[in-house]
Amino acid sequence: MNADNGDSSRHRFGPARRLRAQAKVLPEQARGHNRALVLQTLFHAGAMSRADLSRETGLTRVTISDLIGEFIADGIVVEKGIRSTTGPGKPPILVDIDRDGHRIVGIDLSGPGAFEGALLSLDGEVLERREVPRPSGGTAAYEAVRALAEELLSLSTVPVLGVGVGAPGIVRPDGLVLSSPNLDWNDFPLERLLSAALGLPVLVRNDANAAVLAEYTFGQARPDMLLVRIGRGVGAGLISDSQPLVGSRYAAGEIGHVVVGTDGGPRCACGKDGCLEAWLSASHLRARIAEVPEADADAVLAEAGTRLGVAIAPIVAALDLSEIVLSGPADLLDGTLIAAATRTLTARTLEGVFDDVVIRLTTQDDIVLRGAAVMVLSSQLGVS
Protein backbone atom coordinates (compact mmCIF):
# COMPACT_ATOMS: atom_id res chain seq x y z
CA MET A 1 0.00 0.00 0.00
CA ASN A 2 1.40 3.39 -0.96
CA ALA A 3 1.72 5.98 1.78
CA ASP A 4 -0.09 9.29 1.34
CA ASN A 5 2.69 11.83 1.06
CA GLY A 6 0.37 14.69 2.00
CA ASP A 7 -0.86 12.97 5.15
CA SER A 8 2.52 12.93 6.88
CA SER A 9 2.72 16.72 6.78
CA ARG A 10 -0.13 17.12 9.24
CA HIS A 11 2.23 16.01 12.00
CA ARG A 12 4.88 18.59 11.20
CA PHE A 13 5.57 21.18 13.88
CA GLY A 14 8.62 22.73 12.23
CA PRO A 15 12.31 21.90 12.55
CA ALA A 16 13.12 19.10 14.96
CA ARG A 17 14.34 20.37 18.29
CA ARG A 18 14.40 19.17 21.86
CA LEU A 19 15.10 20.57 25.27
CA ARG A 20 18.84 20.87 25.40
CA ALA A 21 20.75 18.41 27.60
CA GLN A 22 22.38 19.95 30.66
CA ALA A 23 25.48 17.76 30.49
CA LYS A 24 27.71 16.16 27.88
CA VAL A 25 26.46 12.80 26.58
CA LEU A 26 28.66 10.02 27.97
CA PRO A 27 29.44 6.82 25.99
CA GLU A 28 27.20 4.74 28.23
CA GLN A 29 24.35 7.19 27.54
CA ALA A 30 24.80 7.13 23.77
CA ARG A 31 22.10 4.57 23.03
CA GLY A 32 19.49 6.45 25.03
CA HIS A 33 20.56 9.67 23.30
CA ASN A 34 20.25 8.02 19.88
CA ARG A 35 16.80 6.63 20.73
CA ALA A 36 15.58 10.07 21.73
CA LEU A 37 17.14 11.66 18.63
CA VAL A 38 15.34 9.29 16.27
CA LEU A 39 11.98 9.64 18.01
CA GLN A 40 12.38 13.42 18.23
CA THR A 41 13.05 13.59 14.50
CA LEU A 42 10.04 11.45 13.63
CA PHE A 43 7.80 13.37 16.02
CA HIS A 44 8.50 16.73 14.40
CA ALA A 45 9.14 15.72 10.79
CA GLY A 46 6.56 12.97 10.36
CA ALA A 47 6.90 9.72 8.43
CA MET A 48 10.21 9.13 6.65
CA SER A 49 12.37 6.28 5.44
CA ARG A 50 15.23 4.72 7.34
CA ALA A 51 17.64 6.33 4.88
CA ASP A 52 16.01 9.72 5.50
CA LEU A 53 16.44 9.22 9.22
CA SER A 54 20.10 8.36 8.79
CA ARG A 55 20.70 11.56 6.80
CA GLU A 56 18.64 13.72 9.16
CA THR A 57 20.18 12.46 12.40
CA GLY A 58 23.73 11.68 11.25
CA LEU A 59 23.44 8.14 12.63
CA THR A 60 24.59 5.18 10.53
CA ARG A 61 22.04 3.14 8.62
CA VAL A 62 22.93 0.12 10.74
CA THR A 63 22.18 2.05 13.92
CA ILE A 64 18.91 3.38 12.47
CA SER A 65 17.83 -0.09 11.33
CA ASP A 66 18.62 -1.51 14.77
CA LEU A 67 16.72 1.22 16.61
CA ILE A 68 13.69 1.13 14.31
CA GLY A 69 13.49 -2.65 14.71
CA GLU A 70 13.53 -2.17 18.48
CA PHE A 71 10.87 0.55 18.34
CA ILE A 72 8.60 -1.58 16.14
CA ALA A 73 8.94 -4.52 18.53
CA ASP A 74 8.04 -2.24 21.43
CA GLY A 75 5.03 -0.83 19.59
CA ILE A 76 6.38 2.71 19.53
CA VAL A 77 6.97 2.97 15.77
CA VAL A 78 5.00 1.51 12.86
CA GLU A 79 5.65 1.11 9.14
CA LYS A 80 3.34 3.36 7.13
CA GLY A 81 3.70 1.89 3.66
CA ILE A 82 6.00 2.71 0.77
CA ARG A 83 6.82 6.10 -0.67
CA SER A 84 5.69 6.74 -4.21
CA THR A 85 8.74 7.10 -6.44
CA THR A 86 9.53 7.23 -10.13
CA GLY A 87 13.24 6.52 -9.82
CA PRO A 88 15.01 3.18 -10.08
CA GLY A 89 15.36 0.83 -7.15
CA LYS A 90 13.09 -0.49 -4.47
CA PRO A 91 10.71 2.13 -3.05
CA PRO A 92 11.58 2.96 0.56
CA ILE A 93 9.28 2.01 3.44
CA LEU A 94 8.17 4.93 5.57
CA VAL A 95 8.15 4.69 9.35
CA ASP A 96 6.59 6.95 11.97
CA ILE A 97 5.74 7.08 15.64
CA ASP A 98 2.53 5.15 16.23
CA ARG A 99 0.51 8.27 16.89
CA ASP A 100 -2.84 6.47 16.75
CA GLY A 101 -1.68 3.64 18.98
CA HIS A 102 -0.99 5.62 22.15
CA ARG A 103 -2.63 8.30 24.27
CA ILE A 104 -1.64 10.62 27.11
CA VAL A 105 -3.70 11.86 30.04
CA GLY A 106 -3.20 15.50 31.01
CA ILE A 107 -4.62 17.20 34.13
CA ASP A 108 -4.70 20.90 35.03
CA LEU A 109 -5.25 21.74 38.71
CA SER A 110 -4.88 25.51 38.32
CA GLY A 111 -8.46 26.46 37.41
CA PRO A 112 -10.51 28.55 39.83
CA GLY A 113 -13.56 26.29 40.00
CA ALA A 114 -12.68 22.87 38.63
CA PHE A 115 -9.89 20.40 37.97
CA GLU A 116 -9.73 19.88 34.20
CA GLY A 117 -8.45 16.77 32.46
CA ALA A 118 -8.14 15.44 28.93
CA LEU A 119 -7.25 12.37 26.97
CA LEU A 120 -4.78 13.61 24.36
CA SER A 121 -3.12 12.32 21.23
CA LEU A 122 0.66 12.30 21.03
CA ASP A 123 0.34 15.46 18.93
CA GLY A 124 -1.33 17.30 21.82
CA GLU A 125 -4.86 17.15 20.40
CA VAL A 126 -7.60 16.95 23.02
CA LEU A 127 -9.72 13.89 22.21
CA GLU A 128 -11.87 13.65 25.34
CA ARG A 129 -12.38 16.18 28.09
CA ARG A 130 -13.62 15.82 31.66
CA GLU A 131 -13.65 17.97 34.79
CA VAL A 132 -14.53 17.69 38.47
CA PRO A 133 -15.50 20.47 40.87
CA ARG A 134 -12.50 21.87 42.71
CA PRO A 135 -12.52 20.57 46.31
CA SER A 136 -11.39 22.69 49.24
CA GLY A 137 -8.00 20.97 49.31
CA GLY A 138 -6.03 18.39 51.25
CA THR A 139 -7.05 14.74 50.95
CA ALA A 140 -10.27 15.63 49.13
CA ALA A 141 -8.25 17.37 46.43
CA TYR A 142 -6.03 14.30 45.95
CA GLU A 143 -9.04 11.96 45.73
CA ALA A 144 -10.60 14.24 43.10
CA VAL A 145 -7.39 14.17 41.02
CA ARG A 146 -7.16 10.37 41.28
CA ALA A 147 -10.82 9.89 40.29
CA LEU A 148 -10.44 12.26 37.33
CA ALA A 149 -7.33 10.43 36.12
CA GLU A 150 -9.05 7.04 36.43
CA GLU A 151 -12.07 8.27 34.46
CA LEU A 152 -9.85 9.58 31.65
CA LEU A 153 -7.83 6.36 31.54
CA SER A 154 -11.05 4.38 31.17
CA LEU A 155 -11.88 6.34 28.01
CA SER A 156 -8.79 5.19 26.12
CA THR A 157 -9.01 2.16 23.85
CA VAL A 158 -5.23 2.11 23.28
CA PRO A 159 -2.27 2.10 25.70
CA VAL A 160 -1.65 5.30 27.68
CA LEU A 161 1.98 6.42 27.83
CA GLY A 162 1.53 8.21 31.12
CA VAL A 163 -0.22 10.94 33.07
CA GLY A 164 0.98 14.55 33.28
CA VAL A 165 -0.29 16.94 35.95
CA GLY A 166 0.14 20.71 36.13
CA ALA A 167 -0.33 21.93 39.71
CA PRO A 168 -0.22 25.42 41.20
CA GLY A 169 2.55 26.06 43.69
CA ILE A 170 6.15 24.97 44.13
CA VAL A 171 6.81 21.46 42.83
CA ARG A 172 10.04 19.51 43.11
CA PRO A 173 11.35 17.63 40.03
CA ASP A 174 10.28 14.33 41.63
CA GLY A 175 6.67 15.52 41.78
CA LEU A 176 6.61 16.38 45.48
CA VAL A 177 4.38 19.44 45.93
CA LEU A 178 6.39 21.49 48.39
CA SER A 179 3.78 24.19 48.77
CA SER A 180 0.40 24.77 47.15
CA PRO A 181 -1.71 27.00 49.42
CA ASN A 182 -4.70 26.89 47.07
CA LEU A 183 -4.83 23.09 47.42
CA ASP A 184 -3.72 22.96 51.06
CA TRP A 185 -0.76 20.74 50.15
CA ASN A 186 2.63 20.93 51.82
CA ASP A 187 5.35 18.34 51.11
CA PHE A 188 2.64 16.30 49.37
CA PRO A 189 3.96 13.36 47.26
CA LEU A 190 1.37 13.69 44.50
CA GLU A 191 3.47 12.05 41.79
CA ARG A 192 4.34 9.01 43.90
CA LEU A 193 0.79 8.49 45.17
CA LEU A 194 -0.82 8.84 41.74
CA SER A 195 1.71 6.56 40.06
CA ALA A 196 1.08 3.84 42.64
CA ALA A 197 -2.71 4.25 42.38
CA LEU A 198 -2.81 4.25 38.57
CA GLY A 199 0.00 1.81 37.79
CA LEU A 200 1.40 4.19 35.15
CA PRO A 201 4.19 6.75 34.88
CA VAL A 202 3.00 10.05 36.37
CA LEU A 203 4.75 13.43 36.01
CA VAL A 204 3.76 16.36 38.24
CA ARG A 205 5.10 19.85 37.60
CA ASN A 206 4.13 23.43 38.31
CA ASP A 207 1.34 24.54 35.97
CA ALA A 208 3.31 27.45 34.48
CA ASN A 209 6.30 25.18 33.88
CA ALA A 210 3.98 22.77 32.09
CA ALA A 211 2.54 25.61 30.00
CA VAL A 212 5.96 26.84 28.86
CA LEU A 213 6.75 23.33 27.58
CA ALA A 214 3.58 23.38 25.46
CA GLU A 215 4.53 26.74 24.00
CA TYR A 216 8.03 25.48 23.23
CA THR A 217 6.96 22.18 21.65
CA PHE A 218 3.62 22.90 20.00
CA GLY A 219 3.81 26.67 19.61
CA GLN A 220 6.23 28.95 17.82
CA ALA A 221 8.21 29.96 20.90
CA ARG A 222 11.82 31.02 20.71
CA PRO A 223 14.47 29.07 22.67
CA ASP A 224 14.81 31.87 25.25
CA MET A 225 11.44 32.99 26.54
CA LEU A 226 9.27 33.68 29.55
CA LEU A 227 5.67 32.52 29.67
CA VAL A 228 3.44 34.33 32.16
CA ARG A 229 0.18 32.62 33.16
CA ILE A 230 -2.52 35.01 34.28
CA GLY A 231 -5.65 33.56 35.80
CA ARG A 232 -6.63 33.06 39.41
CA GLY A 233 -3.01 33.85 40.22
CA VAL A 234 0.11 34.87 38.31
CA GLY A 235 3.04 32.55 37.63
CA ALA A 236 5.70 32.09 35.00
CA GLY A 237 7.74 29.43 33.27
CA LEU A 238 11.19 30.03 31.81
CA ILE A 239 13.21 28.52 28.98
CA SER A 240 16.74 29.81 28.35
CA ASP A 241 18.94 28.47 25.56
CA SER A 242 16.39 25.67 25.01
CA GLN A 243 16.75 24.63 28.66
CA PRO A 244 13.89 24.91 31.16
CA LEU A 245 14.86 26.80 34.30
CA VAL A 246 13.52 25.50 37.61
CA GLY A 247 15.94 26.95 40.15
CA SER A 248 17.66 25.61 43.24
CA ARG A 249 14.48 26.13 45.29
CA TYR A 250 12.28 24.88 42.42
CA ALA A 251 10.66 28.32 42.44
CA ALA A 252 11.95 29.95 39.25
CA GLY A 253 9.08 31.91 37.74
CA GLU A 254 7.28 32.53 41.05
CA ILE A 255 6.78 36.20 40.22
CA GLY A 256 3.20 36.61 41.41
CA HIS A 257 4.21 37.82 44.86
CA VAL A 258 6.99 40.14 43.77
CA VAL A 259 6.06 43.68 44.82
CA VAL A 260 6.19 45.92 41.75
CA GLY A 261 6.89 49.48 42.81
CA THR A 262 7.33 51.35 46.06
CA ASP A 263 4.00 53.17 45.94
CA GLY A 264 1.87 50.57 47.67
CA GLY A 265 -0.92 49.18 45.57
CA PRO A 266 -3.84 46.79 46.00
CA ARG A 267 -3.75 44.36 48.92
CA CYS A 268 -2.72 40.84 47.89
CA ALA A 269 -4.05 37.60 49.35
CA CYS A 270 -0.58 37.02 50.81
CA GLY A 271 -0.98 40.12 52.98
CA LYS A 272 1.41 42.44 51.14
CA ASP A 273 0.47 45.51 49.13
CA GLY A 274 1.34 45.85 45.44
CA CYS A 275 2.21 42.26 44.50
CA LEU A 276 2.13 41.60 40.76
CA GLU A 277 -0.71 39.14 41.33
CA ALA A 278 -2.80 41.82 43.02
CA TRP A 279 -2.34 44.07 39.98
CA LEU A 280 -2.60 41.46 37.25
CA SER A 281 -4.68 38.41 38.18
CA ALA A 282 -7.86 38.05 36.13
CA SER A 283 -10.15 38.26 39.15
CA HIS A 284 -8.47 41.42 40.48
CA LEU A 285 -8.53 43.05 37.04
CA ARG A 286 -12.21 42.31 36.47
CA ALA A 287 -13.12 43.55 39.94
CA ARG A 288 -11.28 46.86 39.44
CA ILE A 289 -12.78 47.36 35.97
CA ALA A 290 -16.25 46.79 37.45
CA GLU A 291 -15.60 49.54 40.00
CA VAL A 292 -14.78 52.32 37.48
CA PRO A 293 -16.72 54.00 34.68
CA GLU A 294 -16.48 52.19 31.34
CA ALA A 295 -14.33 55.02 29.94
CA ASP A 296 -11.69 54.33 32.61
CA ALA A 297 -11.34 50.59 31.94
CA ASP A 298 -8.38 51.15 29.62
CA ALA A 299 -6.58 53.05 32.37
CA VAL A 300 -6.94 50.03 34.69
CA LEU A 301 -5.53 47.73 32.00
CA ALA A 302 -2.70 50.13 31.19
CA GLU A 303 -1.71 50.31 34.86
CA ALA A 304 -1.65 46.51 35.07
CA GLY A 305 0.46 46.34 31.91
CA THR A 306 2.87 48.88 33.34
CA ARG A 307 3.28 46.80 36.50
CA LEU A 308 3.90 43.71 34.36
CA GLY A 309 6.60 45.61 32.46
CA VAL A 310 8.23 46.61 35.75
CA ALA A 311 8.30 42.96 36.84
CA ILE A 312 9.68 41.45 33.65
CA ALA A 313 12.27 44.10 32.71
CA PRO A 314 15.00 42.80 35.07
CA ILE A 315 14.25 39.21 34.06
CA VAL A 316 14.61 40.05 30.36
CA ALA A 317 17.84 41.91 31.00
CA ALA A 318 19.35 39.29 33.30
CA LEU A 319 18.60 36.34 31.01
CA ASP A 320 18.72 38.15 27.64
CA LEU A 321 15.28 36.85 26.67
CA SER A 322 13.79 37.39 23.22
CA GLU A 323 10.13 36.85 23.91
CA ILE A 324 7.44 37.16 26.57
CA VAL A 325 4.33 35.04 26.02
CA LEU A 326 1.15 35.69 27.99
CA SER A 327 -1.44 33.00 28.69
CA GLY A 328 -4.77 34.18 30.03
CA PRO A 329 -8.04 35.95 29.12
CA ALA A 330 -7.55 37.66 25.75
CA ASP A 331 -10.20 40.29 26.49
CA LEU A 332 -8.04 41.56 29.36
CA LEU A 333 -4.55 41.02 28.02
CA ASP A 334 -4.66 41.85 24.33
CA GLY A 335 -4.34 45.46 23.22
CA THR A 336 -3.99 48.06 25.97
CA LEU A 337 -2.29 45.86 28.57
CA ILE A 338 0.32 44.39 26.21
CA ALA A 339 1.02 47.81 24.71
CA ALA A 340 1.66 49.31 28.17
CA ALA A 341 3.85 46.37 29.17
CA THR A 342 5.89 46.75 25.97
CA ARG A 343 6.41 50.49 26.51
CA THR A 344 7.51 49.93 30.10
CA LEU A 345 9.85 47.10 29.19
CA THR A 346 11.53 49.25 26.53
CA ALA A 347 11.81 52.22 28.89
CA ARG A 348 13.35 50.13 31.68
CA THR A 349 15.99 48.22 29.71
CA LEU A 350 19.12 49.27 27.85
CA GLU A 351 18.20 51.35 24.85
CA GLY A 352 18.78 49.66 21.51
CA VAL A 353 19.49 46.22 23.04
CA PHE A 354 16.08 44.91 24.08
CA ASP A 355 13.88 46.99 21.79
CA ASP A 356 13.02 43.92 19.70
CA VAL A 357 11.72 41.81 22.60
CA VAL A 358 8.21 40.67 21.72
CA ILE A 359 5.31 40.48 24.16
CA ARG A 360 2.44 38.46 22.72
CA LEU A 361 -0.50 36.23 23.60
CA THR A 362 -0.21 32.50 23.13
CA THR A 363 -2.38 31.10 20.36
CA GLN A 364 -2.83 27.82 22.21
CA ASP A 365 -5.89 26.65 24.10
CA ASP A 366 -5.55 24.10 26.90
CA ILE A 367 -1.93 25.09 27.32
CA VAL A 368 -1.42 23.34 30.67
CA LEU A 369 -3.08 20.14 29.45
CA ARG A 370 -0.89 20.16 26.35
CA GLY A 371 2.16 20.92 28.46
CA ALA A 372 1.32 17.92 30.62
CA ALA A 373 1.41 15.84 27.44
CA VAL A 374 4.89 17.20 26.62
CA MET A 375 6.05 16.18 30.10
CA VAL A 376 5.03 12.59 29.38
CA LEU A 377 6.48 12.63 25.86
CA SER A 378 9.77 13.90 27.19
CA SER A 379 9.91 11.37 30.01
CA GLN A 380 8.80 8.31 28.08
CA LEU A 381 10.11 8.96 24.55
CA GLY A 382 12.69 11.73 24.93
CA VAL A 383 10.50 13.93 22.73
CA SER A 384 9.93 17.64 23.34
Image (tube, rainbow, N blue to C red):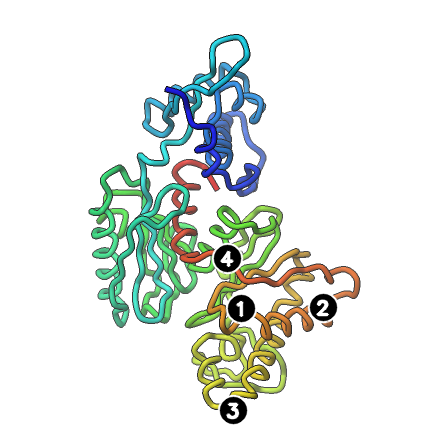
Q: Is residue 38 above or below residue 315?
A: above
Task: Residue at 47% x, 51% y: name it.
Answer: 214
Q: Label 4 amino acid?
A: Thr
Mark nearest the camera among 3 and 1 is 3
- Mark 3, other Cα within 10 Å: few <14 / some 14–19 / many ≥20: few
Instruction: Compute the Cα span from label 3 to label 1.
Output: 30 Å
Labels 3 and 4: the sequence-earlier one: 3
Residues at marks 2 and 3, CA–CA distance in whole angstroms: 30 Å
* Tag 4 residue: 363
N-terminal label among 2 and 3: 3
- Per the model, the C-alpha gap separating discs 2 and 4 is 24 Å
Q: Earlier in the sequence, mark 4 or mark 1?
A: 1
* Disc nearer the start of the sequence (2/1): 1
Q: Residue furthest right?
A: 352
**CA–CA distance between discs 2 and 1?**
19 Å
Please give the residue where the numbered disc 1 appears in the rendered image: 255
- At label 2, the amino acid type is Thr
Kind of residue at badge 1: Ile
Does label 3 or label 1 sit earlier along the sequence?
1
The residue under label 2 is 346
Say which of 295 and 58 sits in front: 295
Q: How many C-alpha atoms fall within 10 Å of the one at disc 2: few (<14), some, or many (≥20)?
A: some
What mark, if any, has residue 293 been given in the picture?
A: 3
Instruction: Give the Cα separation between the discs numbered 3 and 4.
Output: 31 Å
As drawn, 159 above or below 108 = above
Judged by depth in the image, the label closer to the viewer, 2 or 1, is 2
Q: CA distance from mark 4 to mark 1?
A: 22 Å
